[in-house]
Image (spheres, rainbow, N blue to C red):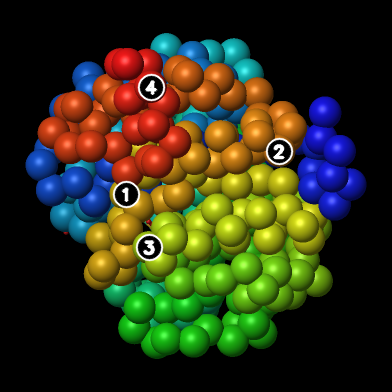
Amino acid sequence: MNSQPNLPRKVKIVEVGPRDGLQNEKENVPAPVKIELVDRLSRAGFANIEAASFVSPKWVPQMATSSEVMAGIARRPGTLYSALTPNMQGFEAALAAGAGEVVIFGAASEAFSQRNINCSIAESIARFEPVAKAAKANGLRLRASISTAFGCPYQGEVPLDAVADVVARMRDLGCDEIDIADTIGVSTPRKTQAVMLRAAQKFPLERLSGHFHDTYGQALANIYASMEVGVAIFHSSVAGLGGCPYAKGATGNVASEDVLYMMHGLGIETGVDLDQVVDAGQFISQHLGRKAVSRAGNAIAAKRAG
Ligand SMILES: CC(C)(COP(=O)([O-])OP(=O)([O-])OC[C@H]1O[C@@H](n2cnc3c(N)ncnc32)[C@H](O)[C@@H]1OP(=O)([O-])[O-])[C@@H](O)C(=O)NCCC(=O)NCCSC(=O)C[C@@](C)(O)CC(=O)[O-]
């Protein structure tokens, strides 16, 4: 039982490892390995897995197998499989692949928008408009991700008003959920609360999510701080995989194992089996030939090994 009145009783954890986690890997990860990873995460109980990204393969070669991955996974009833779609070309591919949710992704800083999707914020919103309409027309869930909401690798500080402005534009496109992303992991708890509360002036707090990279080791603290102000949806990546190809030096998302360990310790329901996520984390780390970047995951694996 969660006896802390200021924390949610239940949270949704969106597993982004197969997309955000793997997109930055230099060596090609074969589709069957990605499929096995998604299937393990499905069996662990995640209600939402970001499994694919229909972007230009010239920009992000690792995601070129997205159609194959979506065709090969064993879809678990109750799990929503999401895909990134920067434009209509991406949307058509996601629709054909059977994505249940499409993710349009913009930024709160102009500099990052240019580097990541090769257009201004205003141009990106114009590109997202037909995607949003098509998502609705086809009965797909629509999510938006807003990068650099807490700081930009090129521009530095990002004003709260800039975040609020993009949140409002994404809301006007009809988004069901909006991710507030700390692309380079620079935020700290009070700043996190300020950004979340400002975003919540434009979009319902219960449909905002926190997407924290752990570059400066602040991600768990930022998640806790977000929960204190009412956020109850968080993104994490198995084994702490990841980094953004257009944010130099950015490390992975906060590790799913660490988030689950904290949530369960707080008595907060996630619906996810931590042991199975640890297994999935060890599986993909072995494939990549390195140790998982998850303190809890590695501790649990070491304890099991005796
Ligand atoms: C947006 C574009 C496509 C614009 O790229 P562009 O070059 O401006 O686009 P274009 O429309 O001029 O097209 C150029 C070429 O790309 C192709 N193309 C065009 N669109 C697609 C598509 N959907 N799928 C496949 N191919 C596509 C198109 O067919 C054409 O091919 P060509 O004629 O030269 O052979 C490009 O900049 C791009 O793909 N960017 C993706 C960047 C990316 O994936 N970044 C990582 C994900 S975001 C992220 O990680 C942050 C997040 C979400 O996790 C939150 C956080 O932590 O901040």
User: From what the image shows, is residue 22 above or below residue 203?
Assistant: above
Give the residue drawn at x 37%, y 63%: 215
Residue 79 image position (x, y, % from top left): 57, 23
Q: Quadrant of residue 290?
A: top left
How far, Cα to Cα, is label 3 from label 1? Answer: 10 Å
Q: Which mark is residue 215?
A: 3
Q: Which mark is residue 303?
A: 4
Q: Earlier in the sequence, mark 4 or mark 3?
A: 3
At 70% across and 69% down in the image, what residue appears? 193
Disc on res. 242: 1
Q: Answer above or below: position of 273 versus 155.
A: above
Q: Is residue 86 visible?
A: yes
Q: Quadrant of the N terminus?
A: top right
Determine whether the residue tagged by mark 1 lies in a helix, strand or loop: loop
Which of the two marks, 1 or 4, is nearer to us in this view? 4
Q: Tell me the distance, in whole angstroms, between the alpha carbons under discs 1 and 4.
A: 25 Å
Whereabouts is ligand 1, in terms of quadrant?
A: bottom left
Q: Secondary structure at mark 4?
A: helix
Q: CA distance from mark 2 to mark 1?
A: 26 Å
Name the amino acid type tagged 2.
Answer: Leu
Snapshot quadrant of residue 46: top right
| Mark earlier in primary sequence (4, 2) | 2
N-terminal-most mark, 2 or 3: 3
Determine whether label 3 and label 1 are within 8 Å by CB.
Answer: no
Q: Is the residue marked by circle 2 packed among few (<14), some (14-19), or many (20+) residues within 10 Å?
A: some
* Callout 3: SS: loop
Give amino acid for label 3. Answer: Thr
Amino acid bearing label 4? Lys
Asked if residue 9 lies left or right of residue 103, the reply is: right
- Tag in front: 3 or 1: 3
Q: Is residue 63 left or right of residue 180?
A: left
Q: Tell me: residue 289, above or below residue 233.
A: above
